[in-house]
Image (cartoon, rainbow, N blue to C red):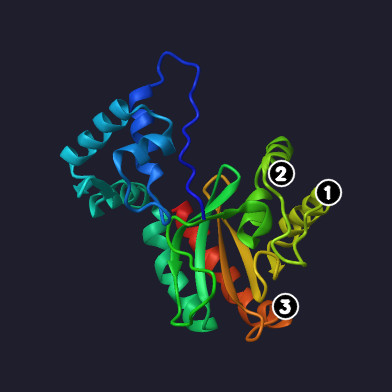
Amino acid sequence: MQNNNQISPAPSDSYAQSFARGLSVILAFGPSTPLMTLTEVAGVTGLTRAGARRILLTLEYLGYVSQENRKFSLTPKILDLGYSYLSANPLWELASPYMEEVVQQTGETCTISVLEGNDIVYIMRVATHRIMSVNLSIGSRLPAWATSMGRILLGGVTEKQLDSILSTSNIIGFTPRTVTDIESLKNIIALSRQRGFCFVNEELEEGLQSIAVPIFGRDGRIIAAMNVGGHANRVNRAGLLENVLPHLQNAAFKISQSLKV
């Protein structure tokens, strides 16, 4: 997955441009760019060398960046930024035991994600020991329109928001089974909202199937989605509906109820 390292400026006198530039430098680092020189950071972010240098040295002073042989990299301290979100999110504490139950009951990985822009972002994941071809972890992003959790989450936005997300998403055929017609996607999202679950069959990656359900907040709105995924050689639609969906729905219901307390 590619990093979204562009920070859109806001036309407001309260917009802190230097802070936004600092975030753009942090986001410039990723799987394909774990180590970068000053010149490379400036090129990726669009900053001048002087501007990139000031930010990198500040981040180094604060402990978020290290430098060796003129190459910069993020340090483990950067995880503090993400942990602040997770520790402040009630899902983190409430959902874990229920997710572990789902994994024990189904033998498959269980994940929770939230909607961020046009993508879903993984915020919790309890994995099995099986190796899957999709390497996903906390913070991973996937296109909402193409995933079971994403379609559940899109069922909780307004019609105007849905139109905006679909019209600005890069809708492509990941596999021969990928649904790319916008009206068909809208119908699938509406049906998933009505049924209370969404099944996706090898649309994101061949061989990968998943089923997702919503998690509701205190006000009854969908705030997250939880899914179980498995390979087609182990599970099929009937198996997911019969052997996985009840456990998934039960766990999501308990999590939703816990959030209301």
Q: Is residue 56 above or below residue 177?
A: above
- Residue 138: in sight, yes or no? yes
Q: Residues within 10 Å of mark 1 (few under 14, many from 20)?
A: few
Q: Nearer the viewer, mark 3 or mark 1?
A: 1
**Residue identifier under label 3:** 237
Question: Looking at the picture, does residue 93 appear above or below residue 11?
Answer: below
Expressed as whole percent of the image width and height from the top left, the position of residue 81 reads 31, 46
x, y percentage for residue 248? 58, 71
Q: Which residue sits at x=62%, y=55%?
A: 150
| 174 vs 154, nearest the viewer | 174
Q: CA distance from mark 3 to mark 2?
A: 26 Å
The image's mark for residue 166 is 2
Amino acid type, callout 1: Glu
Q: Is residue 167 above or below residue 228?
A: above
Q: Amino acid at mark 2?
A: Leu
Report crowding for label 2: few under 14, some 14 to 19, many 20 or more residues within 10 A (C-alpha). some
Describe the element under mark 1 as helix, strand or loop: helix
Amino acid at pointer 3? Arg
Horizontally, residue 130 falls left or right of residue 216, namely: left
Under circle 3, the secondary element is: helix
Residue topped by disc 1: 183
